């Protein structure tokens, strides 16, 4: 079960940087400024994992779809449109 990151103010960070950094090595820590979240401190492994996940995400466009996927997409749109145009009678 993941826990919510603990928050510290920038003043806390100035006074207790060693403790906060030690905590950030175990799990992400939020740094607030004027009671608003402004920064996240996290260990390098978590940071690299986020970068790797981000790099794996890709966005496609109609122009880059395979013909098969484009056909499936077109069929789904037609089915949706037909379903919306057909009045439904209560049972």
Image (cartoon, helix red, strand yellow):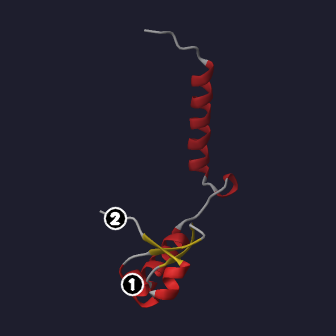
Report crowding for label 1: few under 14, some 14 to 19, many 20 or more residues within 10 A (C-alpha): some
Q: Is residue 20 above or below residue 53?
A: below
| Circle 2 SS class | loop
Query: Can you identify the residue that label 1 sits on?
Result: 25
Residue at the spot 56% in from the left edge and 42% down from the top edge: 72
Rendered location of residue 28, percent (x, y): 43, 75
In this rendering, would 3 be left or right of 10? left
Position of the C terminus by quadrant: top left
Extreme bottom residue here?
18
For the residues labelled 1 and 2, the Cα–Cα distance comes to 15 Å
- Residue 34 point in image, percent of width and height: 60, 70
Is 48 on the left-hand or right-hand side of 80? left
Going from N to C along the chain, the mark reached first, 1 or 2, is: 2
In the shown orientation, is residue 87 left or right of residue 43?
right
Quadrant in the picture for residue 21: bottom left
Residue 31 percent location from the top left of the image: 52, 75
Give the camera-side residue of 49 and 41: 41
Q: Quadrant of the N terminus?
A: bottom left
SS class, disc 1: helix
Task: Mark 1 and mark 2 in contact? Answer it, CB < 8 Å.
Answer: no
Between residue 25 and residue 65, name the one nearer to us. 25
25 w.r.t. 59: above or below: below
Which residue does the numbered mark 2 point to in the structure image?
2
């Amino acid at each position: 079960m993941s826990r919510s990151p603990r928050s510290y103010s920038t003043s806390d960070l100035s006074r207790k940087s060693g403790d906060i950094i030690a905590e950030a090595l175990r799990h992400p820590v939020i740094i607030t400024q004027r009671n608003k979240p402004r920064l996240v401190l996290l260990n390098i492994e978590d940071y690299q994992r986020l970068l790797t996940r981000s790099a794996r995400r890709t966005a496609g466009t109609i122009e880059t779809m395979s013909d098969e996927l484009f056909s499936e997409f077109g069929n789904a749109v037609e089915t949706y449109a037909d379903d919306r145009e057909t009045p439904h009678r209560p049972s």
